[in-house]
């Protein structure tokens, strides 16, 4: 398959692994930011192949995992109202709130519709004027432009029955929060390629200068990740931290200017609560005042989501900040499995715990 198989070449992967092993004079600690990267590192056996040379810890780049309990409870509250259809991506349906999930809410009579895009929710609202349609807008900068476009399209269609429950988050403030943890061990970052496709990577220059850690933009295929790891090790061994783009076929320095303009047109930056990580300054987006008519919270008179600590034994915060590997959690694979998840990282298709549970046998080695 062109544009895919060439980035999964087994022989080239082994060559990259050999180069990395020869280059590393000590065991370095790298964090991949995105859950999609975590799954590829486990799926293709890269984490296992390099375990003696590199410690890979897993970052907060799973939007499902970081959506706080209070916001999930709000989504369920909306879904229980008789005239509202709550639209959500499939990953969100099984994530537990304080007492139940959206899937359980639907089983109890709530109206929850799984959609594949925000525009599908807009189309549903246009086709069903008798119902209020709320789209549960979560995700990083990768999904934010699409929900911004949904707002503009709903405005153009003069829809009065469409709104958003917004919990969009930003990657770089979360990386800042991790670097400010007293127990931080991260020495370099593999930056998420899809986020950089939208936002570019020019803003990482100040981050690198401040914390003196390499930030290397990578894709999600095995050779993309290995090239990114090699570049991190090269910089660490030379003692010269820089921003580097190892995903040039998709990422430009300034990103996608049209998508960035869409975000700026509809959203403004605000402080945001993250599940397991607490409130992080300037780490989220909220609707600008011009678009407040599409704010589901205001439309339905909801108070701001309450800050709630995760009362379960799930240690998502430690996993998402790289302080704990999923297999170090005493509940992993025992009380907590994909069939009986105790927290979001075991539920989400991008969750680190789900990756460890699913990919236990390496392929490359």
Image (tube, grey):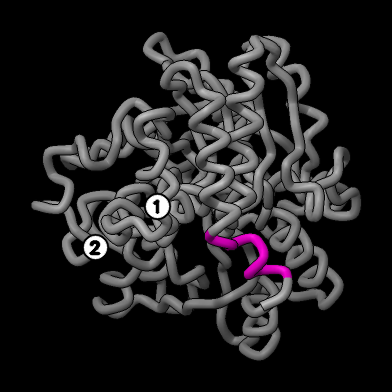
Q: Residue at x 43, y 29 (%)?
A: 54
Q: Residue at x 48, y 17 (%)?
A: 25
Q: Residue at x 70, y 12 (%)?
A: 240
The disc label shown at residue 45, or none: 1
Q: Nearer the viewer, mark 1 or mark 2?
A: 1
Q: How many marks?
A: 2
Q: Which residues are magenta?
A: 3-10
Residue 60 lies, in percent from the top left, at 47, 38
Q: Is residue 63 left or right of residue 241?
A: left
Q: Is residue 314 above or below residue 220?
A: above
Q: Which residue is mark 2?
A: 338
- Tell me the element at label 1: loop
Front position in the image: 86 or 3: 3
Q: Residue at x 72, y 75 (%)?
A: 2
Inter-mark Cα distance, 1 to 2: 21 Å
Is residue 8 one of those drawn in magenta? yes
Residue 173 lies, in percent from the top left, at 61, 27
Is residue 264 one of those drawn in magenta? no
């Amino acid at each position: 398959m062109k544009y895919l198989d060439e980035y999964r070449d087994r022989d080239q992967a082994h060559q990259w692994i050999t180069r990395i092993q020869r280059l590393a004079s000590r065991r370095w600690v790298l964090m991949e930011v995105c859950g999609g990267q975590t799954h590829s590192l486990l799926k293709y056996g890269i984490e296992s192949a390099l375990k003696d040379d590199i410690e890979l810890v897993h970052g907060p780049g799973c939007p499902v995992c970081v959506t706080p309990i209070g916001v999930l409870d709000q989504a369920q509250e909306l879904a229980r109202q008789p005239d509202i259809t709550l639209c959500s991506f499939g990953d969100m349906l099984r994530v537990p709130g304080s007492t139940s999930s959206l899937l359980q809410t639907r089983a109890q009579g709530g109206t929850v519709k799984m959609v594949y895009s925000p525009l599908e929710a807009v189309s549903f609202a246009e086709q069903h004027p008798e119902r209020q349609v709320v789209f549960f807008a979560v995700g990083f900068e990768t999904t934010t432009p699409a929900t911004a476009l949904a707002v503009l399209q709903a405005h153009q269609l003069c829809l009065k029955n469409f709104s958003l429950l917004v919990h969009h988050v930003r990657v770089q403030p979360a990386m800042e929060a991790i670097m400010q943890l007293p127990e931080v061990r991260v020495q370099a970052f593999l930056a998420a390629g899809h986020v950089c496709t939208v936002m570019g990577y020019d803003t990482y220059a100040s981050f690198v200068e401040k914390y003196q850690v390499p930030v290397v933009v990578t894709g999600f295929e095995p050779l993309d990740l290995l090239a990114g790891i090699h570049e991190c090790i090269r910089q660490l061994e030379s003692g010269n931290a820089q921003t580097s783009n190892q995903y040039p076929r998709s990422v430009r320095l300034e990103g996608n200017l049209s998508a960035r303009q869409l975000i700026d047109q509809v959203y403004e930056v605000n402080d945001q609560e993250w599940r397991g990580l607490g409130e992080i300054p300037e780490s989220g987006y909220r609707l600008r005042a011009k678009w407040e008519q599409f704010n589901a919270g205001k439309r339905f008179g909801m108070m701001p989501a309450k800050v709630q600590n995760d009362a379960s034994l799930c240690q998502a915060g430690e996993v998402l900040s790289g302080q704990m590997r999923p297999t170090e959690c005493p509940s992993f694979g025992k009380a907590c499995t994909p069939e009986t998840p105790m927290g979001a990282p075991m539920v989400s298709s991008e969750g680190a715990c789900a990756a460890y549970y699913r990919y236990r046998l390496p392929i490359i080695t």
